[in-house]
Image (spheres, rainbow, N blue to C red):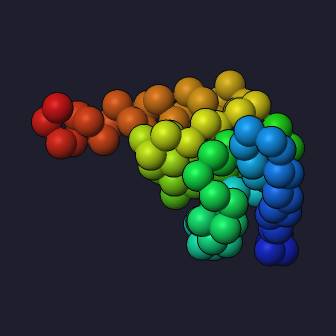
Amino acid sequence: MRGSMTLRIERVSGKRRTRIRLSGELRYEHLDQVKAEIERSGPRVVLDLEEVDHVDVEGVRFLNACRAEGLSVLHCSPYVREWMFREQAEARKSRGD
């Protein structure tokens, strides 16, 4: 059985925006921490997923919610990006859009 995976959150503040760089696994149990970091970071936030190794379904839904609220999601792996699009399409389908 695998041990608990971790997520490292690093905030990089620039002149125009704050980048939140995530490393490791973006899983359901980490979402409250990421949300808190977004709230602390001000209005111009981008999420950088370049070093994310794994995302669970709740993480994908969270990323879609962030995008819906206007946050940019950078350096997302192709498989996660595709999963986000599929999840978004499935949500629209279930709502009857």
Relative placement, left or right, of 50 versus 16 is: right
Q: Quadrant of residue 27?
A: bottom right
Question: Is 53 rendered above or below residue 7?
Answer: above
Pick out the residue farthest to the front. 15
Relative placement, left or right, of 31 versus 67 is: right
Q: Residue at x 47, y 29 (%)?
A: 85
* Location of the C terminus (image quadrant): top left
Location of residue 28 in the rendering, given as x and y in whole percent from the top left corner: 59, 66
Q: Residue at x 34, y 31 (%)?
A: 89
Q: Quadrant of residue 35?
A: bottom right
Location of residue 49 in the rendering, given as x and y in whole percent from the top left corner: 76, 42
Question: Is 87 rendered above or below residue 60?
Answer: above
Q: How many marks?
A: 0
Q: Residue at x 51, y 48 (%)?
A: 66
Location of residue 13 in the rendering, given as x and y in whole percent from the top left corner: 83, 51
Question: Is 60 rendered above or below residue 27?
Answer: above
Residue 64 is at least partly visible in this image: no
Residue situated in front as seen by the camera: 20 or 75: 20
Q: Residue at x 83, y 44 (%)?
A: 14
Pick out the residue farthest to the left. 96
* Location of the N terminus (image quadrant): bottom right
Location of residue 30 in the rendering, given as x and y in whole percent from the top left corner: 67, 69
Relative placement, left or right, of 3 versus 89 is: right
Residue 82 is at least partly visible in this image: yes
Q: Quadrant of residue 4?
A: bottom right
